[in-house]
Amino acid sequence: MSLGGRPPMSRLPLERTTDILFGSVCIEEYNDEAKSFNVKMQELGEKLNTELVIFQLVLSNPYDILSEIIRNPVFSSSFVVMLSL
């Protein structure tokens, strides 16, 4: 069974265009919340794996790879090509 983590959320187009107070800048508080959520989900998954031996839980954490794609789009296009081979 897979537990879903949170992606980086500060650069979502909807958030950047609708939040008048911050304008079009990244809102790092959103990223901090996503990272905190992912840590808690990882801990929960580890705890449940020890308690529920019938299940194998894994966390799908998209934060790091999506953050890298946002920061370095050139890298991400090369990475996608390598994955598709």
Image (spheres, grey):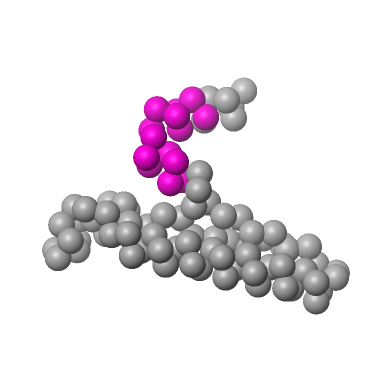
Report whether 81 appears left or right of 68: right
Q: Residue at x 59, y 68 (%)?
A: 41
Q: Residue at x 46, y 45 (%)?
A: 66
Q: What stretch is highlighted in magenta?
A: 66-79
Q: Is residue 16 above or below residue 48?
A: above
Q: Is residue 14 visible?
A: no
In the displayed image of the protein, which residue is found farthest to the right? 54
Query: Can you say which quadrant of the picture contains the C terminus?
Result: top right
Q: Give coordinates of residue 57: x percent, y percent.
A: 73, 63
Report whether 17 appears left or right of 39: left
Query: Can you say which quadrant of the picture contains the N terminus?
Result: bottom right
Q: Does the magenta stretch include residue 56?
A: no
Main SS, magenta residues:
helix
Q: Which of 78 and 68 is in front in this view?
A: 68
Q: Residue at x 48, y 62 (%)?
A: 35
User: Which image quadrant is residue 52 in?
Assistant: bottom right
Q: Is residue 74 magenta?
A: yes
Q: Give coordinates of residue 65: x percent, y percent.
A: 50, 44
Q: In this view, does 69 lie above or below 32?
A: above
Q: Give coordinates of residue 3: x percent, y percent.
A: 63, 63
Q: Give coordinates of residue 51: x percent, y percent.
A: 80, 76
